[in-house]
Image (spheres, rainbow, N blue to C red):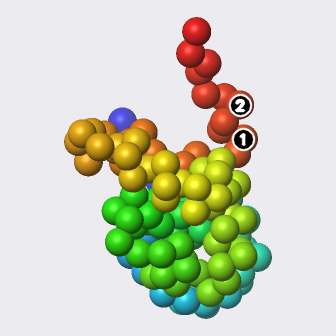
Amino acid sequence: MQVTSSPATAQHLRDLARLRRVRDRIDREYAQPLNVEALARDAHISAGHLSRQFRAAYGESPYSYLMTRRIERAMTLLRRGELSVTEVCFAVGCASLGTFSTRFTELVGMPPSVYRRRAASATDGIPSCMVKKVTRPVRNREARGAEPQLA
């Protein structure tokens, strides 16, 4: 039996590849000034269409994904303790300290200044591969309710 792909399936695969390229660009260039309009323009689709497709594929908007990437990197920089909160904010590509602090608090559960103080000693002696796993913020708020609860 020969399997052939329909035009709709082929288009769906092209759309997924396009979304993967957008996600990879966000992962690579998180510290650069990125916005949904520029990402969509480079992907040759409208900003609204990109946002809808990205959310359907990854469970969150491109902007939310970008901010999560920035916060993950900020967490690493804050744990090192070499930079101030303001320096970390700008190093990860955020233009507003207020927006950075608000988003950081939403994802991590505490303000960046508190995280910096606590994280410096909390991860001593833990291998870096494990630190990254246990300190990774939850990207998709809806997924928090679906996580298994420890007894």
- Tell me residue 67's x, y (percent): 60, 68
- Tell me residue 86's x, y (percent): 55, 80
Residue visible at 39% across and 52% down in the picture: 120
Residue type, label 1: Glu
Which image quadrant: the N terminus?
Answer: top left
Residue visible at 60% across and 50% down in the picture: 108
- Tell me residue 46's x, y (percent): 71, 83
> On the image, numbered disc 1 is attached to which residue?
142
Left or right, residue 136 beside residue 108 = left
Q: CA distance from mark 1 to mark 2?
A: 6 Å
Residue 121 - label = none
Regarding mark 1 in the picture, which secondary structure is present there? helix
Left or right, residue 65 beside residue 136 = right
Residue 145 - label = 2
Instruction: Classify residue 142 by image quadrant.
Output: top right
Could you tell me how many numbered marks the image carries?
2
Left or right, residue 90 beside residue 130 = right
Residue type, label 2: Gly
